[in-house]
Amino acid sequence: MKNRRKFIKQLTSLTAVVGIPSILLGQTPWNNTKEVKATPPATSKSPKRALNRPLIVSTWDFGLKANEAAWTILIKDGAVLDAVEQGIRLCENDPNERSVGFGGRPDRDGHVTLDACIMDHKGNIGSVVFLEHIANPISVARAIMEKTPHVMLAGEGALQFALEQGFKKENLLVADSEREWREWLIKSDYPPAVNIENHDTIGMIAMDNAGNLGGGCSTSGMAFKMHGRIGDSPIIGSGLYVDNEVGAVTATGQGEEVIRVVGSFRVVEEMRHGASPQKACEKAVVAIKEKFVLREKDWSNTQIGFIAINIGGEIGAFSLRPGFTYAVKLDTVAEIRKARHLID
Ligand code: GLY
């Protein structure tokens, strides 16, 4: 090894002097850069890809019915992204789900503004932020992914694009959300706490029969947020990340904290380096807590949760505080589970 290094060193100095063609040194002559092999995703602990064992995991109790809708597609050998989109749309369309889509709680100025993103097994991504008047931001995100050369559209531009694509413009503020907002206006405490009553985000990650992974997430964000505030949910890497060689992850809770540690990407990277989905989620939550400590900030009004799957079909979930639930669908199982948490 020492001799080889010595030889390369000698050869490199020789090149400088006599101009040995770079191709002989493993460099491409046209750009003179050396191609380095990426760290292989597989470790000795890496699981084998599960085939013909579809799996869906979603955040919170409402994930249960979203999973059922997605499952009808997966069991017919459907594509993972179709399943994810349909599952999430079900929550978005439900006026009683007040943290997502139609019926979502407004910002502090009374506007319902929605964020969503979607990612497939090939690394295709689409995201929409600060979208008003369209009940299904997950489908707008997918249309951005499939029909534009871009990955993210915001606000008025996103609305214009959605209308051009045939999405229906509607009032998303339902009476119950408006009433809650008017009650909140009396004190206007800011920022509002993110807790079990005011939780947010349908995040869904899934694997299809072919073993391909995909995911999406959609939210109306923190209730009574500042107008224009964006959380983690539409940010690829924070609210969602999919790597078809490793796993898929999505997050829920206080988006600012998830963004601070690039949460979902971080969980995928932990899995890439050998952690189980459970351990990987735990590490990300600990990292978030450490940032609170470092910044000398109080976390008592904060909730964060991650769910993760790997290519072997293993599942993980973990949250900062108690109360985070997630829904699992596979084979004959369709159930809501309580996530373990870091701090009581
Ligand atoms: N996790 C959603 C948000 O913070 O907006």
Image (spheres, helix red, strand yellow):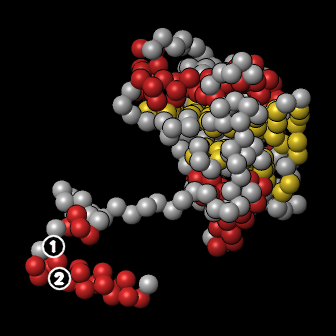
Identify which amino acid the numbered label 2 is placed on. Leu
The residue nearer to you, when weighing 145 against 133, is 145
Image-quadrant location for residue 211: top right
Q: Residues within 10 Å of mark 1 (few under 14, many from 20)?
A: some
Q: Is residue 205 left or right of residue 6?
A: right
The residue nearer to you, when weighing 246 against 190, is 246
Q: Residue at x 89, y 29 (%)?
A: 332
Judged from the image, the secondary structure of the residue bearing numbered disc 2 is helix
Q: Quadrant of the N terminus?
A: bottom left
- Badges 1 and 2: C-beta atoms under 8 Å apart? yes
Q: Which residue is mark 2?
A: 14
Q: Residue at x 62, y 53 (%)?
A: 268
Residue 202 vertical position relative to residue 7 in the rendered view, above or below: above
Measured in 3D between alpha carbons, the distance from the residue under mark 1 to the one under mark 2, in whole angstroms, is 7 Å
- Count of number-bearing discs: 2
- Can you give x and y, in whole percent of width and height, for residue 158 in the image? 44, 26
Residue 135 vertical position relative to residue 122 in the rendered view, above or below: above
Q: Residue at x 68, y 56 (%)?
A: 46
Question: Which of pointers 1 and 2 lies earlier in the amino acid sequence?
Answer: 2
- Can you give x and y, in whole percent of width and height, for residue 259 in the image? 58, 53
Q: Which residue is mark 1?
A: 20
The residue nearer to you, when weighing 332 against 319, is 332
Image-quadrant location for residue 213: top right
- Can you give x and y, in whole percent of width and height, for residue 130 in the image? 52, 33
